[in-house]
Image (cartoon, grey):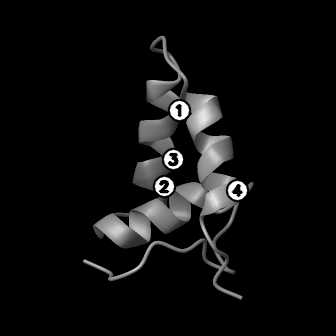
Amino acid sequence: MASSLVRPSRDRWIGGVCAGLARRFGISANTMRLIFVVSCLLPGPQFLIYIVLWILMPSED
């Protein structure tokens, strides 16, 4: 498991949040993106959480 939570400079699609979370938890970025998309089918604040993480997670640059 990686030690820090950062948005990578590579492998970004929109903001790099899913790629950063995937790296932190040691899974594929595409798996994390799939989890996010499936979670959007459920009621809840998924987009708000994504935006907040995009703002709060430092960039790897």
Q: How far apart are marks 3 and 4 (CA)?
A: 18 Å
**Residue tagged 4:** 55
Q: Looking at numbered disc 3 in the image, what kind of residue is underneath it?
A: Arg
* Contact, mark 2 vs mark 4 (Cβ under 8 Å): no
Image point (54%, 29%), residue name:
46
User: Residue 25: x percent and y percent?
Assistant: 30, 65
**Contact, CB < 8 Å: mark 1 with mark 3?**
yes
Residue placed most toward the observer, 43 or 13: 43
Amino acid type at circle 1 is: Val
Q: Does 10 sit above or below residue 27? A: below
Dot 3, crowdedness within 10 Å: few (<14), some or many (≥20)?
A: some
In the image, what residue occupies the spot 72% across and 58% down?
Answer: 15
Asked whether, in this view, residue 35 is left or right of residue 3, the answer is right
N-terminal of the pair, mark 3 or mark 4, is 3
Q: Describe the element under mark 2 as helix, strand or loop.
A: helix
Q: Which of marks 1 and 2 is nearer the N terminus?
A: 2
- Mark drawn on residue 33: 3
Residue 12: % across, % down: 68, 66
For disc 2, the marked residue is: 30
Q: Residue furthest left?
A: 1
Nearest the eye: 36 or 28: 36
Whether tag 2 and tag 3 are in contact, CB under 8 A, the answer is: yes
